[in-house]
């Protein structure tokens, strides 16, 4: 058995680039709640280390970047179906978004990226929203500035150290990191571990079996609807099938 890790970015009324529609997301969450258990990130790590035996098929639901639509659209649905999820946040962006409150407007991903510099508060979660979401979401690091230079260029070491510090200041003690855009090297892994990140999430597809290796957690980028997710979860819950599928191009 393997635990598939799902990767979401945005949930919007309509489907678009790296965004699921509210309708499809709800169908997927309903399907998961009826057929799987959703793990907390801590449970997932215990399972990965071989310290937690699962009596039912399980899944880890993750969100990247900390977009504000996650609070508006995903959070109520996850709550409704009693599911747990994990959110990887870009702490420097949240700091910017928290400077002044602003009305939420649904925008496509590319537009969100464009206005993040000027109006992060419109499209990125603020610390108050994150605090409210913590009864559903575990919060972990997606670096401080996403290795983009919107808010100044800093080294990877600073990206990792600052993010950990900012989370700690908000009583979030994280040793889990998701690499921006799935980009990292062996040296990056070493650096992250030296700073205290023990669990590293990638954008590589594949299976997650208990073997104590926490360096490269595999994830599946979610698309489409409940039928699509049913098939993907079937494949990636199976070690052999999932490993074979991961080698095949999308
Ligand atoms: Zn990202």
Image (cartoon, rainbow, N blue to C red):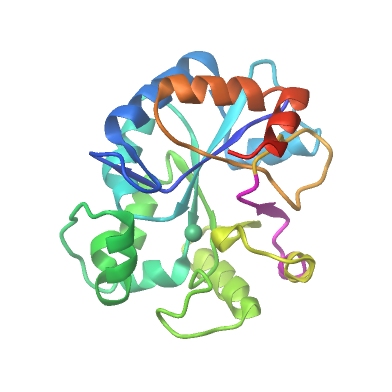
Residue 129 appears anywhere in the view: yes
Q: Is residue 26 above or below residue 136?
A: above
Q: Is residue 15 above or below residue 28?
A: below
Judged left or right of residue 3, residue 7 is left
Judged left or right of residue 63, residue 78 is left
- Considering depth in this image, is 190 or 100 the residue closer to the camera? 190
**Image position, residue 65 (x, y; %):** 44, 57
Q: Quadrant of residue 78?
A: top left
Query: Residue at the location (45% across, 85% down)?
Result: 152
Residues in magenta, as a range: 192-204
Q: Is residue 1 above or below residue 116?
A: above
Residue 79 appears anywhere in the view: no
Judged left or right of residue 62, residue 199 is right
Query: Residue at the location (51% across, 64% down)?
Result: 167
Query: Residue at the location (75% across, 64% down)?
Result: 189
Q: Quadrant of residue 23?
A: top left
């Amino acid at each position: 058995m393997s635990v598939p890790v799902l990767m979401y970015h945005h949930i919007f009324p309509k489907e678009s680039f790296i965004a699921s529609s509210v309708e499809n997301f709800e169908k997927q969450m309903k399907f998961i709640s009826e057929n799987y258990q959703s793990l907390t990130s801590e449970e997932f790590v215990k399972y990965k280390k071989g310290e937690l035996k699962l009596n039912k098929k399980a899944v880890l639901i993750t969100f990247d970047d900390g977009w504000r639509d996650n609070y508006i659209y995903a959070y109520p649905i996850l709550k409704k179906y009693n599911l747990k999820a994990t959110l990887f946040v870009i702490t420097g962006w949240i700091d910017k978004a928290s400077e002044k409150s602003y009305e939420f407007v649904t925008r496509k991903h590319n537009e969100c990226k464009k206005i993040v510099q000027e109006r992060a508060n419109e499209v990125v979660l603020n610390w108050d929203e994150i605090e409210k979401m913590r009864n559903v979401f575990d919060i972990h690091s997606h670096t401080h500035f996403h290795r983009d230079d919107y808010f100044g260029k800093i080294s990877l070491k600073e990206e990792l150290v600052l993010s950990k510090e900012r989370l700690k200041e908000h009583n979030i003690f994280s040793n889990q990191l998701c690499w921006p855009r799935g980009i990292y090297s062996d040296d990056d892994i070493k650096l992250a571990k030296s700073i205290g990140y023990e669990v590293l999430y990638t954008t590589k597809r594949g299976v997650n079996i208990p073997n104590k290796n926490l360096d490269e957690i595999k994830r599946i980028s979610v698309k489409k609807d409940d039928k699509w997710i049913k098939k993907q979860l079937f494949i990636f819950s199976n070690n052999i099938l999932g490993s074979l599928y991961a080698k095949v191009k999308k």
